[in-house]
Image: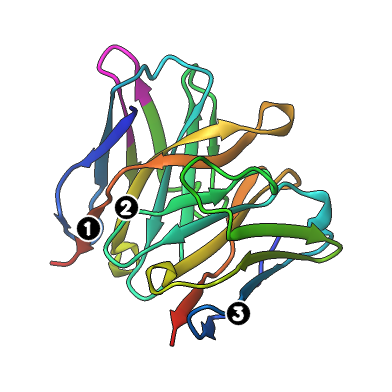
Amino acid sequence: QLHLQESGPGLVKPSETLSLTCTVSGGSILTPYYWGWIRQPPGKGLEWIGSIYYSGITYYNQSLKSRVTISVDTSKMHFSVNLRSVTAADTAIYYCARQHQGVAARPSWFDPWGQGIVVTVSS
Amino acid sequence: SFVLTQPPSVSVAPGKTARITCGGSNIGGKSVHWYQRKSGQAPVVVFYSDPDRPSGIPERFSVSNSGNTATLTISRVEAGDEADFYCQVWDSGDDNVVFGGGTKLTVL
């Protein structure tokens, strides 16, 4: 059964870069799926950050696009997100998830999800 | 950009029917996915591409989607159904994943 696990620092200073990794186990990352990042700020709903196909094709949330880079390392069976110039507004639970393809091979629904990692932006 | 609107909360007594709506312009023409997030847990998909229910999701859960509203219906609600529910679509106009704001289901 596919399992995803987020890892990275739980505390990041303002203006620095938040870097998280999602390790995939129980299956291959070299499959026709996207791999996505989603976050949930305290007291708020889910917000999509971006998704990457195993070949490297990326889609980003337009509101975060200028600060986000998602990459995939197929040899290490993981994918990562870098979010630059963070502020307190980037404090959230960060989830990674496998994303299925939908119409015209575009990203669709997410399943399964990792357990999530709490990241706090504070000095 | 495409917007999905959900009621912040829905309350229902055990054994009754809960309906959670997800509004969006011509959402009936899109594939809508639904997630359940119980307290302290990661979200779980309960419906994908509208009518498809993953194995393990009770048949008490059903969906409909027409016009400007998609609806998740939970029949014979149980205490264990209490959670936050989110709808989600792919907005092909902006190449964006869009989530609704979420609905907190409270079982009275």
Q: Amino acid at mark 3?
A: Pro
Disc nearest the viewer among 2 and 3: 3
- For badge 2, the amino acid type reads Tyr
Q: Nearer the viewer, residue A42 or A112?
A: A112
Q: Residues within 10 Å of mark 1 (few under 14, many from 20)?
A: many
Q: Quarter of the image for the C terminus of chain B: give it.
A: bottom left
Quadrant of the image containing the N terminus of chain B: bottom right
For label 2, the crowd category at 10 Å Cα-Cα, with few meaning under 14, some 14 to 19 and many 20 or more, is: many
Q: Quadrant of residue B72?
A: bottom right
The disc label shown at residue B7, or none: 3
- Is disc 2 placed on a helix, strand or loop? strand
Disc 1/disc 2 C-alpha distance (Å): 6 Å
Name the residue that disc number 2 marks.
A94
Residue identified by numbered label 1: A118
Task: Tell whether position B11 is magenta.
Answer: no
Q: Position of residue A113 (x, y in %)?
A: 37, 43
User: Badge 3: few (under 14), some or many (20 or more) residues near its Cα, within 10 Å?
Assistant: some
Q: Earlier in the sequence, mark 1 or mark 2?
A: 2
Q: Is residue A70 above or below residue B68?
A: above
Q: Foreground mark, 1 or 3?
A: 3
Q: Position of residue B50 (x, y in %)?
A: 69, 49
Task: Give the side of residue A11 with respect to residue A43, left or right.
Answer: left
